[in-house]
Amino acid sequence: MGNEDEKGHWSRRSFVSMMAGVPLACMLPSGPAIGVDTDDDTALPAKDMFALKGTYINAAYTHPMSVGSYREISKFLNARMMNRLEPKTYDPFERSSVNAAFAKLINASPDEIAMVPSTMVGENLVVSGLGIPGSKEQVVTDGLHFEGSLHLYGELEKQGVKLTVVKPRNNRIDLNDLEAAITPGTRLVALSLVSATTGFIHDLKKVCEVAHARGALVYADIIQAAGAVPIDVRNSNIDFCACSTYKWLMGDFGVGFLYVRKDLLPSIKRTLIGYRQMQTYVSHVLPYDPPGERTFESTSAVTMSGHFEVGTFANEGIAAVRYSLDFLNRTGVDKLYQYRQRMISRLRTELDPGIFEPLTPPDSVSPIVSFAFRDAGKKIKPKLDAADINISVYENRIRISPSFYNDMNDIDHLISVLKTV
């Protein structure tokens, strides 16, 4: 789920190439092709918030950045250019408000949030901080977890970690199967809250209840959930979760968030260490430095930053997600999720299951609907390209992920093309 690789089908390189073809006039904040960014929280679909090319129903791959986020990045770039065009009170490196906004989105406290470069970095920090690599600890995960994460645990298994991977049945992970895999010796249960493959969504609260009853901790990759479905870390009692911001949070690459439940922080080891973690630093080598027997003295902050943040961030991405998090919190993820579900329901109803084999469980409320289709890459993608429709197309399946800039006309356009296959 974090940083997914499309394996040649709408890869990041092809996405960047596509965006490179958009005329510059269509990217300027004041350009008429963009429309008016009104921030009207009641107006859906919010097409005017974006400058989209064609029919884009692929937000689970990379959510389009909004015009408002583009403008925020422009402010940041003006500050970096030192050209005096940024607002006088603008602080290009202020990020406490961004952490607070993300914390609000998932019902956490700001002091439980750290910034990380990506979802997978967050998961690695949790796993290494628990001392799992090189140990004999047991990790339970499932076959619908992000493939990069499964690779992580497969490599750790080679180092001695005891790994159990619960297989999906009927395109879902049965809670009973997961419960059977979690033994009293299990250290960590790791999963994707929303599967990037099928759109299956775990009942996170029940998973945590089962795992905690056996003494296990729970990590969730929430990249396909945060900003798309409601998340409440207090209600679910999740221990750790992480996400990048370039999907449903409408930010950009290189910036993500890591949540660690406050009472667990002291038990997590620092495994990557850098200047952002310092509480104090005193030099004893330069002229006028205070005297000391050592060349320097330093201490680490006992905070999320002091545990997990190492060096510099992709600050343009922070500027972008500051804007989008404000929009998501004001509008409400509930409203956006309900709007999107009508479009997903239409796709399920209109596409013949005898031709498009459903992969998404019918009770899923995730932002993703997937179908198996033999030779999809050869048979479907050329037709979609000709119709200027962008969804995720794999060798033998398709994934559709509408957002709040889409409407039923977009869905009907897609359905009309798919019915010709």
Image: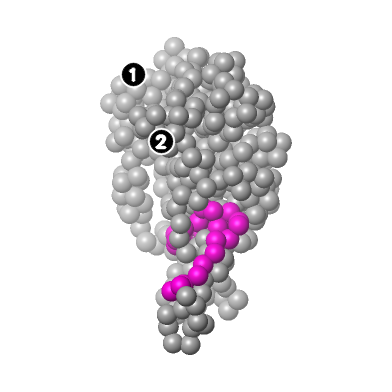
Q: Is residue 277 left or right of residue 332?
A: left
**Comes first in the chain, label 1 or label 2:** 2
Residue, x 39% and y 29% (percent of image)?
Answer: 160
Q: Nearer the viewer, mark 1 or mark 2?
A: 2
Label pair 1/2, CB-CB below 8 angstroms: no
Residue 382 sits in which quadrant? top left
Q: Amino acid at mark 1?
A: Arg
Residue 299 appears at what percent x and percent y? 54, 64
Q: Which element carries disc 2, helix, strand or loop? A: loop
Q: Amino acid at mark 2?
A: Gly
Residue 333 appears at what percent x and percent y? 65, 42
Residue, x 28% and y 26% (percent of image)?
Answer: 378
- Tag on residue 374? 1
The correct choice, above or below, for 414 with respect to 262 in the image is above
Residue projecting furthest to the bottom: 288
Q: Which element carries disc 1, helix, strand or loop? A: loop
Give the residues drawn in magenta, as a range: 294-318
Q: Is 17 colored magenta in this rendering? A: no
Residue projecting furthest to the right: 235
Q: Is residue 163 among the parts visible in the rendering?
A: yes
Residue, x 31% and y 44% (percent of image)?
Answer: 14
Q: Which residue is mark 2?
A: 134
Residue 30 appears at what percent x and percent y? 49, 65
Residue 221 appears at what percent x and percent y? 52, 37
